């Protein structure tokens, strides 16, 4: 299965985009539902969504496609997948991207 530049295999979700040199991103499905605490969120978030959000070379479209790939792959384990954690993770991602955009706008004003 493929979502944008992301391939979903039996064991992983992997970046398959071209033209970005040595940039790679791959998550093992066995660890995809691990959570992390991020101070700004005050609630558990899916680690891999937080990590993908931190990759500055991924575009917003790439992250959007990653989120779909993540939800699709996580749907194979519906008893372990939490929509609440997923929603909180996406909210964190959106807020982070918005803050980055605001910072870029502030830099343009100088």
Image: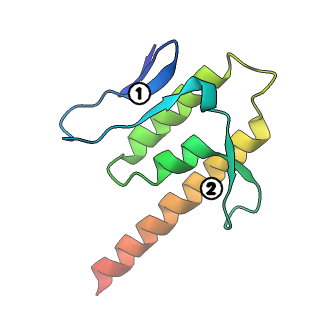
Instruction: Give above or below for 67 relative to 100.
Output: above
Q: Position of residue 51 (x, y in %)?
A: 51, 48
Q: Give left or right: position of 94 versus 52.
A: right
Q: Position of residue 90 (x, y in %)?
A: 62, 47
- Sooner in the amino-acid sequence: mark 1 or mark 2: 1
Instruction: Give above or below for 2 relative to 110.
Output: above
Q: Position of residue 5 (x, y in %)?
A: 35, 28
* Depth order, front residue of 32/85: 32
> SS of the residue at dot 2?
helix
Q: Residues within 10 Å of mark 1 (few under 14, many from 20)?
A: some
Instruction: Give above or below for 104 relative to 84.
Output: below
Residue furthest bottom as drawn: 110
Quarter of the picture containing the C terminus is bottom left
Q: Residue at x 33, y 38 (%)?
A: 24
Q: Are marks 1 and 2 in contact (CB under 8 Å)?
A: no
Q: Which mark is residue 14?
A: 1
> Spatial distance from mark 1 to mark 2, Cα to Cα?
22 Å
Q: Residue at x 52, y 12 (%)?
A: 10
Q: Give left or right: position of 7 versus 91.
A: left
Q: Indicate how the structure is coloured in the image.
A: rainbow
Q: Give the mark count.
A: 2
* Depth order, front residue of 104/1: 1
Q: Residue at x 56, y 41 (%)?
A: 48
Q: Residue at x 36, y 55 (%)?
A: 56
Q: Position of residue 69 (x, y in %)?
A: 52, 26
> SS of the residue at dot 1?
strand
Closer mark to the observer between disc 1 and disc 2: 1
Residue 26: image quadrant is top left
Q: Name the residue beneath numbered marker 2.
A: 92
């Amino acid at each position: 299965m493929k979502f944008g530049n992301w391939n979903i295999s039996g064991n992983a979700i992997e970046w398959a985009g071209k033209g970005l040199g040595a940039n790679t991103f791959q998550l093992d499905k066995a660890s995809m539902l691990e959570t992390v605490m991020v101070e700004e969120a005050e609630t558990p978030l899916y680690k891999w969504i937080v990590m993908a959000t931190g990759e500055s070379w991924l575009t917003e479209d790439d992250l959007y496609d990653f989120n779909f790939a993540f939800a699709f792959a996580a749907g194979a384990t519906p008893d372990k997948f939490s929509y609440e954690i997923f929603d909180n993770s996406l909210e964190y991602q959106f807020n982070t991207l918005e803050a980055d955009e605001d910072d870029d706008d502030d830099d343009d004003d100088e």
